[in-house]
Image: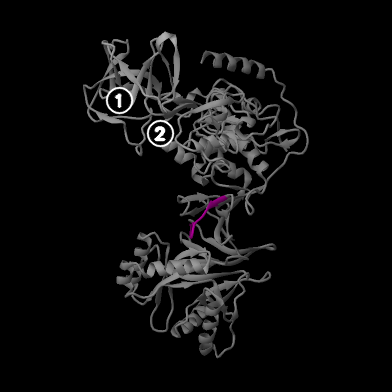
Amino acid sequence: MWRMTVALLAALVLVSVWTVWPSYGAVPKLDTIRVAIFINLSKYQVNTAIGTFSSAAPIDVGIRQPSGVQSLFQTKAGESIRLTMDDYKVTVMETTDFAKAVSVSKRLKTAGGTPFLTSSPRTGAAMYSVMEGAYTTAAAAKTAADKWTKDATLASLTGKAQALPAGPLHLEGSVYSSEADAVKAVAAFGDAGIPAFAAMKQSGEGKGQYTVLVGAASDDAGLAAVKQLAAAVTGGAGLKTMDTKASYVGLRDDFTVTESAKSPQKLISVPLTGTKVWLQSNSANGIKLAERYSRSYRGQFEISGLNSKLAIVNELPFEQYLYSVVGAEMPSSWPAEALKAQAVAARTYAIYQGFGFQIAHVVDSVQSQAYNGITAEKPTTIAAVDATTSEIAMYNGKAIETLFSSSAGGASADAQEIWGNAVPYLKSVPSPDESSEKGLYDWYRVVLPNGKNGYIREDLIATTEEKTAAGSAILRVKGDGVKVRPIPLIQDSVTPVATVNSGTMVVMIERVVQSNEMSWIRGPFTSSQLLATITGKVKTAVKGPITTLSVSKTGPSGRPTEILVNGAKLDVSYPDAYRSALGGLPSTFFTIDETARMTIAGANNKTSERTGNSSSLAVLGSDGAATAYSDSDIYIMNGKGEVRAASKEPTFRFVGNGYGHGVGLSQYGARGLADKGYDYKYILQYYYKDVTIGKD
């Protein structure tokens, strides 16, 4: 540890004499940014079947075209609207009994479906339709329809009615002067047993026009049947096949959420292609999207179909986007200079990405950088963005890829030891990340009376004056029902090693800080557990059982760049893939504890290496007789009197540092440097070698 401290101080001295190079060249600038909240791409898929929007002020709903936004209608203040794809669905039931329709809708939701409870007018009474799903093909909708038909609970509610696939193929009726006139036409088709709903279409630069979409066929044959039935209503005139690429939206009354016949919401269906619905509001509190953790967002929303799924994009002023990113990526209570460094890094990263997601610059997750809407904004994060307006980090006059992670674990990574390619400004430097350990509990690794070992938190254990014959400290458990953890961290989803009660005496092996962003422990993993997590994540399959796992090469920071499993290279695409291949490790900055590997001293001063794969162990008694060692846990003392927990069968523990890839800016390191009095430009130029900070 002291070597790292000396190296860090030396590095800081060197950095302190850097020249702050002047800005040169045109600085890239972005006025607005498009953030994909839900999108369906091969490289990134976060999907939803529905988008529910609301705002304290009215929401203007329009269709966005190259010439601008053409308004369709406006909601009431506080009113929610729901948008879905006009895609393939399943019609589960149609009934005039609202209570029965609600029961069917609830059953679909309980069974894992996505229900839609809507109504369409009839001359006598409203007809309630319960539909389900958001399917990309007619075949998928047919499969779902068969499944719902066989659902016994649904059958009891629907009277064993056959669920039927529905689709996006419609006939288009005449143009009407008002929604009320369109609804009257819908009722006429409904009385004839033909599903229909009001819609608005937009062409050219004129205002939206009301029309009626007739039928919801999943194939051409179904549409032809609808056309034949509809001829009786219209006399064969005024209907044509709806252009699926036209700009239109379907309008229905929706009761799915309210479950009240007197409180419908507006359900807007968006075509698979061709239409971009635009939502904007003047509310200072933004627009809320229920399906994304009910977050509220600045700016506007664009909703469209992309790759047969609903795409929801938030478009807003670029600098306002950063208000949220800085607050989502770094605690707002951290020093101002650290927040400013994060602001410049986030701004540069977004500019560097360009239009990286087809219809959006970035996404709202850490696949790009975290963006949580207005709720993530704080006065300090806003101030950090405003204080650095338009500033970005550049290398040779171009915006750089300002990669950052939570903690470098004491030393940032060189890009080459993470992804296999060298980047001149992404080199390894010592990093002061220790602040993540401040205030955390220490944990004792102890041996239990039954020979097992695990970790107990310091406040649940007391020291004693007693020691073992080998000199190890003996501790006493405080309180009943104390859980002994496999690592020094409370994990509710992981079964404890054991539960012990007050007064239990245990033997101390080591004392460590609670696993955190700076230092951590994971495991132990058995051979079969590692095989399961490695499978499918390597280019060359690993044949089990795994008996040895060792680091054979490391990069400039000490992170593994090559790992051997059973003596052969663990063949990943790039070193950072070790994290997922080895069970979702926090970083690649680790050493491997092969618990079954040990060097055994034998007769005639000979030693042997044991990995636990085949050799057996025996205990030599005072009478010279050897007895086979049967316990799974083994405790070994070295020449320094240190006790190591080993095992008879191979298991593997990972002892590491850092959280994330470790390349570029370390957020905890930025905090550490800011605490030492360094400003944000210094912090950025410390982690990104030879960069300049430019401003338009």
Residue 262 appears in the picture as rendered: no
The quadrant where residue 686 appears: top right
The quadrant where residue 553 appears: top right
**Residue 39, position as x, y percentages in the image:** 56, 54
Tell me the residue that label 1 is attached to. Answer: 630
Q: Which is nearer the N-term, disc 2 or disc 1?
A: 2
The quadrant where residue 400 appears: top right
Residue 595 part of the magenta segment: no
Amino acid type at circle 2 is Thr
Tell me the residue that label 2 is attached to. Answer: 526
- Of residue 4 and residue 84, the one placed in the foreground of this image is 4
Bounds of the magenta segment: 44-54
The reply to whether discs 2 and 1 touch (Cβ–Cβ < 8 Å) is no
- Of residue 105 and residue 674, the one placed in the foreground of this image is 105
How many callouts does the rendering have? 2
Residue 46 part of the magenta segment: yes
**Residue 251, position as x, y percentages in the image:** 51, 70
> SS class of the residue under badge 2?
strand
- Of residue 359 and residue 296, the one placed in the foreground of this image is 359
Query: For this view, does 211 lie left or right of residue 625?
Result: right
Query: For this view, does 459 lie left or right of residue 265?
Result: left
| Relative to 20, residue 421 above or below | below
- Of residue 462 and residue 259, the one placed in the foreground of this image is 462
Residue 188 appears in the picture as rendered: yes
**Residue 167, position as x, y percentages in the image:** 51, 71
Amino acid type at circle 1 is Ser
